[in-house]
Amino acid sequence: MTKKFGVLCCKNLAREMATIVATGEFPDLVTGTFHIGCGGRRVRWGDGIEGPFRKMQEICDRICIIRCGDTVEPPTLPGPGPVVLVPDLLRGVLLPEPLFDAYVGEGALILVPGMLSRWEEHAAARGFVGEAAQAILFDSIRKIVLVDTGVDPESSRLLADLGEKFGVPTERISTGIGPLRRYIGIQYLQWRLDAERRLSRDAVAAVNRRSADYVMTIDILGRIAEIQREETVVEEMLNLFTILFAPARIAYAPINEGKPGRIVSRPPCYYDIPEHGGRFFTEEGWSPGRHGEDGFLIEVRHKSTCLGLLLLEGVAVPSRIDEYLDISRFVAEVCGLAIGNARTYRKVQELVTERDAEIGERMRVEKALREANKKLNTLSSITRHDILNQLAGLLGYLEITEMDLEAGRLPADPTLIRYVKSELQAARTIQRQVEFTRFYQDIGVNDADWHDLGALIQQTAGELPLAGVSVEVGIPGLRVYTDPLIGKVFYNLMENSVRHGGEISRISVTSSGAPGGLVIVYTDDGTGIPAAEKEKIFRKGFGKNTGLGLFLVREILAITGITIRETGVEGEGARFEIFVPEGEYRFVE
């Protein structure tokens, strides 16, 4: 049974999915709904969604689970199962990610029409029952944003009522059903493409298995079986039968998808005459076997499909026709295999042409993206320069104001002094962060390459004030395939050791084998990192300076699938383990 493409959505999105299904664009699409914890909470895999998923799992080999809140995290299911897609619907499908993040940063509650029409039910599901409890829920909400898909004509009124009820501003973003339909369409087409690729691979595999069964026959008729053009196979087949049986006339009528094609004959065009061509086909079709005293008709078949009819008339020794028939059936099987292979090869060539066109298009897109990135980087550099110029002026005015306050040239208002100090601190932080983007904008812009890690670390150490600190590099000959900004990784690690490690005297870098790859170990003998901060140090914004150093380190490494974690013991020094997957590193003499 051919599997389907399934979309399992929460009931808040049922009308949107019904609208998409009603268009008839996706004939192999099946849908289902669930009702579990909608309204923004991350949900567990259990009652409410597992039942509908299990039913859909039986008929679908790809399932897309969408809901109006956080994504669902299905468990790893035993045995072969469908491919499961769990998109972030609001962030990235219905709304662009930057816009969604901006609304969340403003404290906005983002709704779809289904949630809006049943907001009291969702509030109750989260424990907010009654107007007082609901007021507590909305107390932390600064705005209500409706992502209007156009399925509920009452949405605008309901949005206004809800905003008035809880005294918060509202905003309506009219997206229509288009973004969701496009997302479903892309996933559906990808599913169809994958299915066609599987069918193509299975067809080629079946042909190859059939070819193996006929090894002995191919040894005899190898020349025919190796031909890839059907027209050439037919010519060679007619040559072979002419050599074997010396008929006065021979002809072949191809049949493709049950329809006869143009007859190839010797002498040429003999069977184009209706009275002669009637020996192939009658009103009842065709009849394999003897044709008169000195001829016979056989089917050229591949598996259960008739690919053509071969007619011989006027054989040299009519008395041996029965023997000729036995030999002909055997030879016709090999010829049928060759013709079947030739037709399959033609289809494969068509698929290869389509694939090459797809690859070419992808390469053109990637080139366009690279050009766009270069232009964006240029724009970013110009913008950063202008911002820094403005910041320099702002800092100058603030510092003059601070000096005037200290010198008594301005009234020494404590509040004003505090404000100026805070403004100076904020402006300097902005300046450091803007300058930091100079490094961050280059991540992933240039192609990854092989880098001599030992030489690179030694070079980086020479760029830092490491007086009194020994740097021991024990990774001779190690090459790592990574982003060209790999030097920034070890620069940041060493700078952090010097800046935050206290009185350090030694930094070392070693490597050791690990399942599935290689671990590069960076250590120092400083104060170490508290256990509670081992993961926080990689977050954007964590830290005493820009808060981007180790965040940048992880981003650079992740481009080529390399990971980093901190495993040291507080008080015994920092220890960073960098895991490089198999194939992304090598040792050179």
Image: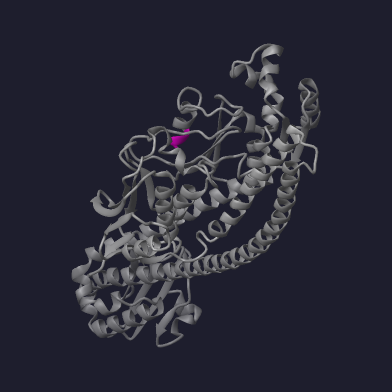
Taking depth in this image into account, of 21 and 68 the one nearest to the observer is 68
Looking at the image, residue 102 sits to the left or right of residue 340; the answer is: right
- Measured as percent of width and height from the top left, residue 519 is found at 29, 51
Taking depth in this image into account, of 311 and 518 the one nearest to the observer is 518
Image quadrant occupied by the C terminus: bottom left
The answer to whether residue 414 shows anywhere in this view is yes
Looking at the image, residue 269 sits to the left or right of residue 511; the answer is: right
> What colouring style does the render use?
one colour
Q: Quadrant of residue 317?
A: bottom left
Outermost residue toward the bottom in this view: 267
The answer to whether residue 161 is magenta is no
Relative height, residue 390 to residue 48 (above, below): below
Magenta-highlighted residues:
56-60
Image quadrant occupied by the N terminus: top left
The answer to whether residue 24 shows anywhere in this view is no
- Measured as percent of width and height from the top left, residue 466 is found at 38, 56
- Measured as percent of width and height from the top left, residue 268 is found at 43, 87
Residue located at (39% from left, 63% from top): 462
Looking at the image, residue 184 sits to the left or right of residue 494; the answer is: right
Taking depth in this image into account, of 214 and 584 the one nearest to the observer is 584
Relative height, residue 493 to residue 62 (above, below): below
Q: Quadrant of residue 455?
A: bottom left
Looking at the image, residue 569 sits to the left or right of residue 538; the answer is: left
